[in-house]
Each structure stands twice: as structure tokens, then as C-alpha cells.
Amino acid sequence: MIEKLQKIIDDSNNIVFFGGAGVSTESGIPDFRSQDGLYNQQYDYPPEQIISHTFFTYKPQLFYKFYREKMLFLNAQPNAAHIALAKLEKAGKLSAVVTQNIDGLHQKAGSKRVYELHGSVLRNYCTRCLKPYSVERVKNDSGVPYCECGGIIKPDVVLYEEGLDDRTVVGAINAISRADTLIVGGTSLVVYPAAGFINYFKGRNLVVINKTPTAADKGADLVVYQPIGEVFSKLKI
């Protein structure tokens, strides 16, 4: 499996990586749908309700309590997958990373062209005047963070009921459609519309690396059921 993946990478000139929460679990950031994921933990409200636009608007105090406890991992470090992808980009092999993650670890590892479909916890802005704020400002506030103008500060993340950023979507789709190899990793491919992006791939090699089966496995040229960081650590880049 590793030998075949190595050959695909060696023979490719325009790789795009499409990843999800499983890319960051090896950095200590929990995913949503695994046995220990956020969706299988008990709260007064379901997590998918808490991280919705409606909940943020009407119960910001509870939103921020959950957000700070369960979605901010500022001490997390890139793992072997993040580092390998950054190296592939630097070597001219990889043209873009398309990620569903909001942790900024791809950039922390050195990746330059990253399409963050669901935004980033590292960016925050006032909902009234749009003034930008650091993640530390949000993290260190004891309650709902407010701008000096009186508006609520919101993380630049896509909550449930919100649409994806148009420019990010166009950039991600263009990158995928031009790739000769698409590596899908650490994602169950059940979150839409993001999961549908892989349908734009028309290149030679579709690779899926995930601990559990996905809907893309049948059409893939290579499927590896292992943690993605473990797989990338064995590659020669």
C-alpha cells in the first residue's frame, strides 16, 4: 500500500489534498463523529445545535462556553500528515490543500495554499463593524466577547445554517478539477456540501486514506484504512 502511494506521488505533478477532522486527531484535536467525538458526548444541547447560527445569535454565552472548551486547541502542533503535505507543496508536487478543519495546522506546518472550507478559529471579527480580533482575545475573555463598538465578536468559522465562502469554494473546486492526483484523507465524506467537492476531480489517481470506509472507496485507485499521519510518516518526500 505504501509503495503504491509512493509511486503515485512520485509520478504526479499536480496533487491536491482534501482532508477532514481525521487529519488533526493525531495532533490531539477530537473529531465529531467517532466514538469519542463531540457528537457522542453529553451536553444540555446537541453539539450540532450549539454550533449553529441560531444558537450563536440567541444563546451566545452558552455557545462560547462550548466553543472555548471543545473547539479551541491553540497548543496543538502539526503532525506527520501536515508536515508531509507542506513538504510536497514546497517540492512543487502539491498545488493546494482543501480542508474542512478550522484549526490552522496546515499553515502552521508551512502550507501556503490552503482553502479552508469551514473557516478558521484563528480569525475573528466584530459582527457589527467587522473589526478583526485575535483568537487570544476570544480565548481569554470570560464571557461573550464584545467589540469596542458594542458588537459581538464572532469566530470566522462556518456554523450550521451558514453558507460557505464563495471565493473559497471557487478556489477549491478549480484546484481539484485541475489536479492529476487527489488524495482524500481523514474524512468520512458525510458533511455536505464539502464532501461533494471530490466529484469535480477528473484526474488520473484518486487516493483515499481513512481509518473507516467512505463513499469514495469504490471509485478510488488506492484505499488505505490507516491513520493518515501514520501513512504519511512512511513516505519519502
Image (tube, rainbow, N blue to C red):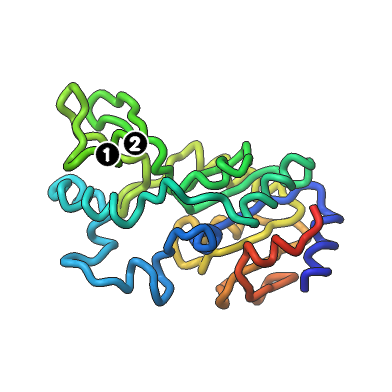
Q: Nearer the viewer, residue 222 or 27?
A: 27
Q: In this view, does 109 lie to the left or right of 144?
A: right
CA neighbours of label 2 inside 10 A, class few (<14), some (14 to 19), many (20+):
few
Question: Residue at horizontal 21%, vertical 27%?
Answer: 147
Residue underneath mark 1: 140
Q: Where is residue 84 in the image (x, y as percent from the top left)?
A: 69, 52
Question: Residue at horizontal 49%, vertical 56%?
Answer: 194
Q: Which of 220 and 96 is in front in this view?
A: 96
Picture disc at residue 228: none
Regarding residue 179, the answer to whether it shows in the image is: yes
CA neighbours of label 1 inside 10 A, class few (<14), some (14 to 19), many (20+):
few
Q: In this view, does 205 lie to the left or right of 193?
A: right
Q: Position of residue 26 (x, y in %)?
A: 54, 62
Q: Which of 217 and 61 is in front in this view?
A: 61
Residue underneath mark 2: 136
Kindly state the secondary structure of the residue where label 2 is placed: helix
Q: Position of residue 17 (x, y in %)?
A: 64, 53
Asked if 190 appears above or below 177 in the picture, the reply is: below
Q: Is residue 116 left or right of residue 156?
A: right
Residue type, mark 2 in image: Glu
Kindly state the secondary structure of the residue where label 1 is placed: helix
Would you say the residues marked 1 and 2 are in contact, meaning their CB atoms lie under 8 Å apart? yes
Label 1 – label 2 distance at C-alpha? 6 Å
Asked if 171 appears above or below 20 in the picture, the reply is: above
Dividing the image into 4 quarters, which one contains the N terminus?
A: bottom right
Instruction: Work out which residue is located at the far front of the displayed protein and give it.
Output: 75
Q: Position of residue 226 (x, y in %)?
A: 63, 73
Number of numbered discs overlaid on the protein picture: 2
Regarding residue 196, the answer to whether it shows in the image is: no
Question: Residue at horizontal 25%, vertical 34%?
Answer: 153
Residue type, mark 1 in image: Asn
Question: Residue at horizontal 31%, vertical 31%?
Answer: 125
